[in-house]
């Protein structure tokens, strides 16, 4: 097997798969090597829809299994910081929710980095390129969920007749759909939102996520869809090597020339080496290779190639806390399903049908503003610019999601006949920033991760007000009629009791990002430019969630795919790889 390629992409997660596949499919057919530390992940059981919330914690081989440093302000918790390993990366173990976020976040991103590639108008076109939306929502639920995508002849005709353009793509590599049928009791979520005045949003993925809605699912035709779907029918110029963990970037002078793996193989790139190892491992590999904060590198006796103080810094993440309604037996079908899961599994294995295909696939998710947060001292203490951004009509302050399986019910031991509804409240626009550093210079060692979740007073205020509003929501008549009691929740609605609960019941959303931040020319702290080039060296790019300058108010896999697609477009243009393309000035291919 050759050890020299035009491009080497390291890491086969959302960004890496999108980039490697698109580069290889370009007209000039460059040779692309996709190097991945984990395995193929091609066992059919990894794609079962009903396991989407639990696979990450059941299949250790698919998960790097990271934990944070103890978060002393959160009762010393070491928070689960799972990362996917193997083809598909974290998309192979994630919860399969497809959420794009607020238009204004992308406009802000474009402004921050001074590059219109990232504004909502342009980003929306790239999201459509990723998506294959299937919008067959059961007719009786269309008043709650009704995205504009030409998924069926009927919808296409309606859109055409009413002159409405589709919000979603229908021929991208990633198939997305909504649950059909809905699980018993799911409509209560929408009725309750209307009862308490929180509103319903028929498509939270239109660019305006405000209101209670439904996340689309990375599920189609009885299977979860993951980033490795980009690699189906890979062209012969795309070489995929699994079980190949990168240990170091190779350099010739200040040009990156290749990758050394932990088992001692060297691979060389004629053009670029691209790191897509995710927001924890990309900064780790840069530091192991001598690019990072001088003090950190010297601490581990790593020769400093380039002193870059912000590598590993600025880490952002979403986090959530939970409360659960214990409901009258029979309000939902969950206990019946759990009791007969083995039969359902056998049925699924036979012909992909039955409850393993549909259960836990409807995930109500909504985004909300909060007058109480806007009136708070913590909000007023933010700089004027950030305040103005958060006040924009489509930018949410907190998120609520419901209908997770029995993962988040706190200390309560669910009984076999229990019905329950777990509600998650997420902090949006987080202001806390954490960091990734090294435990040692050994590439097999885990990175040291300290996200400092909820360390900023604004984030704590959002957490408290979001939980308070969520508890009010859970008292809506639609729920009350079948509620026995609230469990795994704050003792009271006081700030102190809510904080006491959240500080001990805090989960990362696994949306870590921004550790190798992108910025405009004048931004001296930025690690990469808007074409993903690592500053100060040649031939090296980072293309994954590490580079995003702000965490959009969404769930991040969509952004990770977007980053991969965007990098592909930029590289194809830069190297003239498209049909009739010519390289841009001074670049030869
Ligand atoms: C449990 C869980 C649930 C989630 N749920 C959702 C959800 O429902 N919706 C949503 O939008 N997002 C969700 N996410 C987040 C989402 O999956 C990630 O944001 C997204 O996958 C990040 O993409 P990435 O390309 O930056 O990195 P990743 O997808 O993490 O890919 C990085 C890849 O690099 C590989 N790699 C790392 N180090 C090396 C090395 N040294 N050499 C070679 N390869 C290496 C990894 O094995 C991995 O394959 C979830 C994540 C987790 C962990």
Image: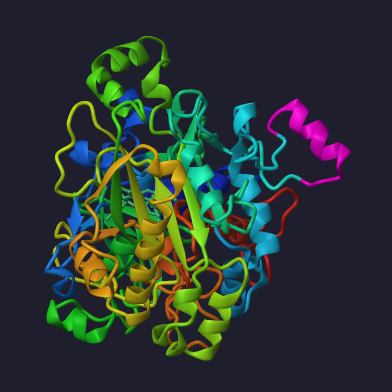
| Nearest the eye: 377 or 226 | 377
Position of 472 with respect to 133 (left or right) is left
| Screen quadrant of the N terminus | top left
Residue 530 vs 296, above or below: the answer is: above
| Nearest the eye: 240 or 402 | 402
| Nearest the eye: 256 or 85 | 85
Residue at left offset 41%, top offset 62%: 469
Occupied quadrant, residue 207: bottom right
Residue 30 vs 369, above or below: the answer is: above
| Nearest the eye: 483 or 442 | 483
Residue 211 vs 330, above or below: the answer is: below
Position of 399 with respect to 577 (left or right) is left
Number of marks drawn: 0
How is the model colour-coded?
A: rainbow
Occupied quadrant, residue 157: top right
Answer whether residue 96 is visible to the viewer in this image. no
Q: Residue 371: where, in percent of width, then height?
A: 51, 74
Q: Residue 438: where, in percent of width, then height?
A: 18, 71
Answer whether residue 124 is visible to the viewer in this image. yes
Q: Residue 380: where, in percent of width, then height?
A: 46, 88
Task: Please say whether residue 389 is one of the residues in the magenta stretch.
Answer: no
Residue at left offset 50%, top offset 65%: 552
The part of the chain drawn in magenta is: 151-165
| Screen quadrant of the C terminus | bottom right
Question: How would you classify the magenta stretch by its main secondary structure?
Answer: helix
Q: Residue 470: where, in percent of width, then height?
A: 39, 58
Residue at left offset 25%, top offset 47%: 408
């Amino acid at each position: 097997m050759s050890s020299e390629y035009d491009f080497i992409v390291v890491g086969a997660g959302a960004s890496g798969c999108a980039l490697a596949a698109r580069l290889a499919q370009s007209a000039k057919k460059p040779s692309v090597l996709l190097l991945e530390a984990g395995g193929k992940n091609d066992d059919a059981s990894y794609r079962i829809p009903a396991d989407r919330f639990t696979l990450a914690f059941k299949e250790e081989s698919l998960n790097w299994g990271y934990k944070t440093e103890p978060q002393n302000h959160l009762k010393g918790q070491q928070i689960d910081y799972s990362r996917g390993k193997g083809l598909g990366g974290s998309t192979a173990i994630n919860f399969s929710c497809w959420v794009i976020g607020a238009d204004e976040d992308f406009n802000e991103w474009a402004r921050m980095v001074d590059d219109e590639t990232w504004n909502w108008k342009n980003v929306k076109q790239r999201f459509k390129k990723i998506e294959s939306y299937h919008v067959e929502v059961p007719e009786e639920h269309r008043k709650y969920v009704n995205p504009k995508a030409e998924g069926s002849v009927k919808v296409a005709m309606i859109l055409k007749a009413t002159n409405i353009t589709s919000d979603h793509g229908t021929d991208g590599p990633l198939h997305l759909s909504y649950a059909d049928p809905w699980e018993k009791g799911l409509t209560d979520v929408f009725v309750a939102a209307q009862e308490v005045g929180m509103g319903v949003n028929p498509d939270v993925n239109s660019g305006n996520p405000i209101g209670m809605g439904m996340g689309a699912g990375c599920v189609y035709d009885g299977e979860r869809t993951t980033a490795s779907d980009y690699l189906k029918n890979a062209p012969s110029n795309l070489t995929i090597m699994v079980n190949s963990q990168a240990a170091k970037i190779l350099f010739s002078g200040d040009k990156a020339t290749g990758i050394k793996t932990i088992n001692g193989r060297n691979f060389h790139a004629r053009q670029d080496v691209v790191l897509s190892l995710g927001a924890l491992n990309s900064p780790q590999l840069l530091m192991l290779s001598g690019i990072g904060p001088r003090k950190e590198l010297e601490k581990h006796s790593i020769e400093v190639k380039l002193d870059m103080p912000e590598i590993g810094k600025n880490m952002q993440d979403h986090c959530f806390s939970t409360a659960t309604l214990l409901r009258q037996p029979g309000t939902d079908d969950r206990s019946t399903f759990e009791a007969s899961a083995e039969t359902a599994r056998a049925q699924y294995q036979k012909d992909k049908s039955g409850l393993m295909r549909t259960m836990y696939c409807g995930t109500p998710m909504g985004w909300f503003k909060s007058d109480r947060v806007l009136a708070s001292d913590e909000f007023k203490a933010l700089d004027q610019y950030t305040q103005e951004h958060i006040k924009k009509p489509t930018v949410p302050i907190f998120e609520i999601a419901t209908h997770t399986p029995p993962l988040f019910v706190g200390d309560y031991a669910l009984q076999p006949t229990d019905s329950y509804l777990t509600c998650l409240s997420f902090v949006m626009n987080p202001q806390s920033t954490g960091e990734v550093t090294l435990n040692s210079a050994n590439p097999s060692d885990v990175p040291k991760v300290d996200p400092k979740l909820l360390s900023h007073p604004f984030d704590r205020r959002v957490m408290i007000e979001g939980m308070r509003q969520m508890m009010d929501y859970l008292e809506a008549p639609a729920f009350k009629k079948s509620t026995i009691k609230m469990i795994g929740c704050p003792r009271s609605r006081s700030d102190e009791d809510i904080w006491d609960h959240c500080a001990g019941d805090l989960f990362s959303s696994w949306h870590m990002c921004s550790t190798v931040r992108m910025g405009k020319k004048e931004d001296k702290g930025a690690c990469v430019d808007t074409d993903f080039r690592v500053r100060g060296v040649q031939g090296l790019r980072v293309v994954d969630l590490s580079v995003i300058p702000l965490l959009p108010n969404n769930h991040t896999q969509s952004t990770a795919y977007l980053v991969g697609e965007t990098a592909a477009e930029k590289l194809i243009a830069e190297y003239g790889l498209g049909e009739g393309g010519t390289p841009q000035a001074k670049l030869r291919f």
